[in-house]
Amino acid sequence: MTIPLITTKSEEIFAAAQKIMPGGVNSPVRAFKSVGGQPIVFDRVKGAYAWDVDGNQYIDYVGSWGPAICGHAHPDVINALKAALEKGTSFGAPCVLENILAEMVIDAVPSIEMVRFVNSGTEACLSVLRLMRAFTGRDKLIKFEGCYHGHGDMFLVKAGSGVATLGLPDSPGVPKAVTSTTLTAPYNDLEAVKQLFNENPGEIAGVILEPIVGNAGFIPPDAGFLEGLRVLTRENGALLVFDEVMTGFRIAYGGVQEKFGVTPDLTTLGKIIGGGLPVGAYGGRRDIMSMVAPAGPMYQAGTLSGNPLAMTAGIKTLELLQKPGTYEYLDKITKKLSNGLLQIAKETGHAACSGQISGMFGLFFTEGPVHNYEDAKKSDLAKFSRFHRGMLERGIYLAPSQFEAGFTSLAHTDEDIDKTLAAAREVMSSL
């Protein structure tokens, strides 16, 4: 049954926000432009739930866009942060917490022998691009259409996430000279990558990709795609970079590279390793990472990098994820959700396809299958907008874009999934 969704306070706050912040938000996809209506202003979060400023409660499948894998405001993380706060919020100097989290990351992620912490996924990707170029002495980069690697100039070419959601062209303010070295190929298309290497012999520093796409909706790699990229990069003296900001410690404790058994040269991380606080990291082979200052000549720095609060939250989160059965549980409840949504769509007469791996899922309103961004764009965006609003009115908070993956957490229960599927049946029956 539809609950009356009273959002008076959200509307007042967002109206005020639009006068003082561009579009009323600090990140574009939050503005609900692609789904219509006004955004919900959150007041607090706990476990699998969020409450808005009007007191409405939602089952949350955004999870701060991925970090809340243990559930929002996990008591172990909160208690660790309270203790860390007493020692100070930022040192601007080395602290032992950096060593502890670095060792945990290195132990977990197959490709990482050394790691550098930064403050966001964007910063990690910008830094790893500079490192790729410094190590190889080459300037060109291959990325994939619909993959998002942050808002750095050279990545804003056929990008995903908010760029895809809002239908933006390559961003104004980005000089053509900057993006002239960015080459693009369709995701899951090895022949296109091979052609780019043939057309640019000895000029490509490397290939960067989301090994499972989450910024054009949920799109997994075809069989052999990641393995093929590993072969092509090695054959051409280029580096392979997995952007695991979203998938790191979510798809498996060691990320996609552990799950699929393909080891890149470099990896970017974020989200989960900060336990809900701003964080990013890049790491990889020791010989490559030794190029980074002060060990080597490639400069990169950050005042708040490795700050004690983010390190504390990250350490505690990774400790929680090491408990037996963690990823089996995430896979079980997410499969129940994903399969249930697809079944309901079919029963109610809607063209749809869905997928999930571990605690990450997606639903497209298109017959599918979806192998790349071009396939994803065939989705019925108007239908998704109506679906999103209907779910919101029934207390289910989904990402406000057809082109974003969804996330579950260890705090989501079978009852939460059942409630979500019951809501989905009501909504899809009325679309």
Image (cartoon, helix red, strand yellow):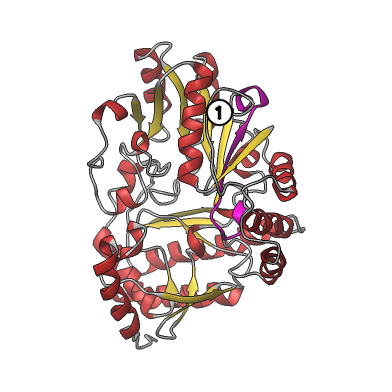
Is residue 277 at all visible to an observer of this figure?
Answer: yes
Q: Residue furthest right?
A: 324
Alpha-carbon neighbours of circle 1 within 10 Å: few (<14), some, or many (≥20)? some
Q: Amino acid at mark 1?
A: Glu
Q: Nearer the viewer, residue 367 or 165?
A: 165
Report if residue 281 lies within the magenta region.
yes
Residue at x-position 31% and y-position 36%: 157
Q: Quadrant of residue 28?
A: bottom left
- Residue found at x 41% / y 49%: 215
From the viewer's perspective, is 426 left or right of 264?
Answer: left
Indicate yes or no whether the magenta region holds residue 374. no
Circle 1: element type? helix
x and y percentages locating residue 201 in the rendered image: 40, 11
Give the camera-side residue of 429 and 42.
42
**Residue 106: quadrant of the picture:** top right
Examine the image and state in which quarter residue 7 appears: bottom left
Tell me which residue sits at (32%, 77%) in the image: 13
| Quadrant placement of the C terminus | bottom left
Compared to residue 30, the image places residue 376 above or below, namely above
Range covered by the magenta-colored residues: 273-289
Q: Nearer the viewer, residue 362 or 100?
A: 100
Q: Does 207 sit above or below residue 246?
A: above
Q: Residue at x 60, y 67 (%)?
A: 71
| Residue 174 position in % (x across, y down) | 27, 36
The residue pinned by badge 1 equals 227
**In the image: residue 8, left or right of residue 242:** left
Q: Looking at the rendering, in which quadrant would you find the N terminus?
A: bottom left
Percent from the top left, x then y, of residue 405? 44, 55
